Image (spheres, coloured by chain):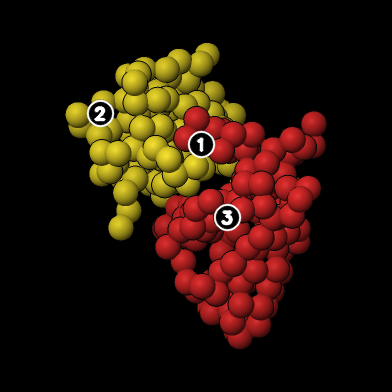
Amino acid sequence: DQQVKQNSPSLSVQEGRISILNCDYTNSMFDYFLWYKKYPAEGPTFLISISSIKDKNEDGRFTVFLNKSAKHLSLHIVPSQPGDSAVYFCAASSPNTGNQFYFGTGTSLTVIP
Amino acid sequence: KAGVTQTPRYLIKTRGQQVTLSCSPISGHRSVSWYQQTPGQGLQFLFEYFSETQRNKGNFPGRFSGRQFSNSRSEMNVSTLELGDSALYLCASSLLQGSAGELFFGEGSRLTVL
């Protein structure tokens, strides 16, 4: 039972344009969301997080939007750079479950120079 | 500051054997979580340890077990290996034990079961 879904396995974007990665979840108890980036042969690295009390969080070129009513979050990367090419995972957790996160299956982003 | 270290990085086992994987968290981090990554399944939560106590456990059979030592280092063990256990096993450490924590992942241990 996949509680966090990333329905686009891959995405290609031109350098300088916006990349939008989407994530849907089914559990209304989720209150904390993370995005991770993963290069081949490396572990995932943390990008940005958002709490359910917010609907937007920004960090440099990365912005995460949360739509609780739609149970949807998205990661915007502006402008996209070739070094952003990686697999992106979204993850969610619910209260009082420690660091038990539910991860999506990932979206492979390719930024074309 | 050294990152999360996992050993071994690669290993090959046969069905029925058992395996132990090791994880050294970032210095000062007391929470260690383990995840299994398989193609098409994303990362699946195995368990979390905090201060030597298992705090949460994912939906995996009892063949999967773990422990944490007083220095926060953790090991996970899989007994009676099955072909489906072939995966990348990722360890993550965190300063906080709670849903406001950021997970720092190691590079993983890739297990192949033949």
Task: Report, in whole angstroms, how far the alpha carbon at label 2 lies from the one at label 3.
Answer: 31 Å
Residue that badge 2 annotates: A68
At horizontal 69% and vertical 38% (from top left) the residue drawn is B29
Q: Where does residue A9 sit, x and y in percent of width and height? A: 38, 46
**What colour is chain A?**
yellow
Shown colour of chain B = red
Checking the image for residue B98, the label placed there is: 1
Question: What residue sits 65% from the left and 82% below the top?
Answer: B17
Could you say which disc has been placed on residue B35 in the image? none
The relative height of residue B10 versus residue A59 in the rendered view (above or below) is below
**Please, what secondary structure does the residue beneath circle 2 have?**
loop
Q: Residue at x 59, y 82 (%)?
A: B80
Q: How many marks?
A: 3
Give the distance between the C-alpha atoms of the residues marked 3 and 1, in whole angstroms: 14 Å
For the N terminus of chain B, the image quarter is top right
Q: Chain of mark 1?
A: B
- Amino acid type at circle 1 is Gly
